[in-house]
Amino acid sequence: MYKIHILIVTDSPDFAKSLGYLILDVFGTRTTEIEYAYNLQDGLNQINQGEYHFIFISGNSDSNDFHENKQLFKEASLNPNVKIIKLSVSGSIGYEEVSNDTEKRNCLSKDEIDAEDFAYILEKMK
């Protein structure tokens, strides 16, 4: 059976587990394998050991840091088609996809996200 492999990189274990449960609600436990890293270095170490379809990375207010981190994860990934999603907190659900000649940017933001919204966002990313 085909499994979706997901890595969540955030310094908040509670947030990571909540997002993990939400992902399991959307994809189901039989088709999804989720791993967690609680800092960027651990995330980079993990990405070298497995092929991930999605990587969720907590973003901070400095978008340059996220861009640099995204590039590090892209280069370290065993999957050239990995989707890297920036996680941030805001008041409204948002999926942002900005395309230009060199890059697509994905961002997921909200203080609370329900499974239906999340499923819609992941479907748009396919």
Image (cartoon, rainbow, N blue to C red):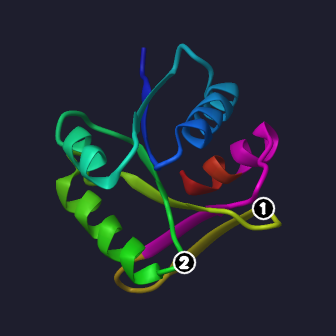
Above or below, comparing residue 17 to residue 70 in the picture: above
As helix, strand or loop, the secondary structure at mark 1 comes to loop
Q: Is residue 91 left or right of residue 19?
A: right
Q: Residues within 10 Å of mark 1 (few under 14, many from 20)?
A: some
Q: Residue at x 47, y 80 (%)?
A: 63
Above or below, comparing residue 70 to residue 13 in the picture: below
Q: Is residue 11 left or right of residue 25?
A: left
Q: Residue at x 78, y 48 (%)?
A: 117
Boundaries of the magenta span:
104-120
As helix, strand or loop, the secondary structure at mark 2 comes to loop
State the separation of the CA atoms marked 2 and 1: 17 Å
Q: Residue at x 30, y 46 (%)?
A: 43
Residue hosting label 1: 93
Residue 102 falls within the magenta-colored stretch = no
Above or below, comparing residue 125 to residue 90 in the picture: above
Residue hosting label 2: 61
Amino acid at the residue labelled 1: Ile
For residue 26, which quarter of the picture? top right
Q: Is residue 80 left or right of residue 101?
A: left
Q: Are marks 2 and 1 in contact (CB under 8 Å)?
A: no
Q: Position of residue 77 (x, y in %)?
A: 23, 50
Quarter of the N terminus within the rendering: top left
Q: Residue at x 25, y 54 (%)?
A: 80
Q: Which marked residue is nearer to the observer: mark 2 or mark 1? A: 2
